[in-house]
Image (spheres, grey):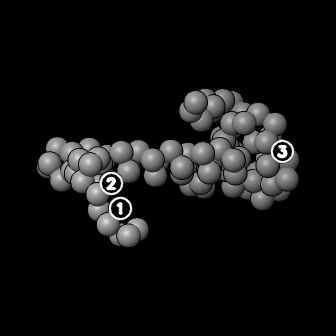
Amino acid sequence: MGVPTIDLTEDIKPISEFRANAAALVRQVQDTGRPVVITQHGQSAAVLMDVAEYQRLTDEVETLREIAAARRDFDAQRTESHQDVMARARARLG
């Protein structure tokens, strides 16, 4: 599941509106699940998003980084067999 699509008519706000209506914009994000883009001088400057969605995205990025690293190890043949790992673990445990 990805981030809900931004509604271009509702979810892009100038920083002046954010300053004046921060609590209402936080409620909007919580109610709709959509992030709000905050602009400054007509340019996108920040994104206000639900904290659970932010956590989900950061967890997903970390998982994808781990998968990419594992893939690089596999492609470079930096792998060990299950038997070798288990033998090493048994040796450490006594």
Q: Which mark is residue 90?
A: 1
In terms of secondary structure, where does tag 2 sit? helix
Q: Earlier in the sequence, mark 3 or mark 1?
A: 3
Q: CA distance from mark 2 to mark 3?
A: 51 Å
- Which residue is identified by label 2? 86
Q: Nearer the viewer, residue 63 or 15?
A: 63
Q: Residue at x 24, y 54 (%)?
A: 84
Report the side of 93 relative to 28 (left or right).
left
Residue 89 pos. (x, y %): 35, 62
Please state the total of marks drawn on the protein image.
3
Residue 39 visible in image? no
Q: Earlier in the sequence, mark 2 or mark 3?
A: 3
- Which residue is identified by label 3? 27
Residue 57 pos. (x, y %): 55, 45
| Label 2 with label 1: CB-CB less than 8 Å | yes
Q: Could you tell me the amino acid type at mark 3?
A: Arg
Residue 74 pos. (x, y %): 21, 45
